[in-house]
Amino acid sequence: MASPRITKAFSQHELLLPLTTATLDLGLIAVELSPTTAKIGIRDLAPFKDQLLILAGPAQEQGDVSYSLFIVEPRAGATPTPVASIPDLIKDGKRMKAESVTILDAQGDTLRILILFDGPRNGEPREYRLSFK
């Protein structure tokens, strides 16, 4: 299977961005996403088949931590897979916070996802296509 890529819906551009990671605690199941020194937090989770799509981002206001997506099986010892980095949304010179992710549709190896941001009016929803081809 090729590396996953994210492309903005209705765009020809593909983004291949490096990811940072963190640790996620799913109740009684701890999933290691990265070294514990990372300054990343879990923003939202979306169920996908028997896995979870994880939206992660800065725990505080760190400008050097990207908003990113991971996919993981919710079981002890599972290794999360970094999927993609979310492009920054800048409004009035300030980076908006990606806060929620929803899976709109799944067709074969492609997911349509919706991400909403904290800060802009009505969350300024953005649709992306996530391809696992």
Image: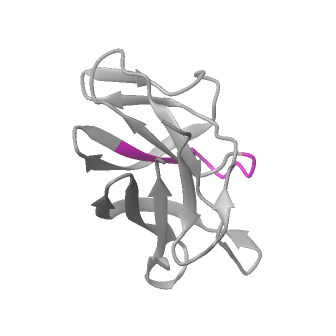
Tell me residue 125's x, y (percent): 46, 76
Residue plotted at (55% across, 57% down): 6
Toward the viewer: 44 or 70?
Answer: 70
Toward the viewer: 96 or 10?
Answer: 10
Residue 62 lies within the magenta run? yes
Q: Is residue 93 left or right of residue 37?
A: right
Indicate the quadrant where residue 102 lies: bottom left
Report the magenta residues as a range.
Answer: 53-64
Pick out the residue farthest to the bottom: 121
Q: Is residue 63 left or right of residue 113?
A: right
Residue 84 lies within the magenta run? no
Indicate the quadrant where residue 29 lies: top left
Q: Is residue 115 left or right of residue 45?
A: right
Toward the viewer: 83 or 57?
Answer: 83
Indicate the quadrant where residue 30 lies: top left
Tell me residue 88's x, y (percent): 66, 64
Toward the viewer: 31 or 120?
Answer: 31
Tell me residue 87's x, y (percent): 64, 62
Residue plotted at (36% across, 15% down): 77
Q: How many numbered discs? A: 0
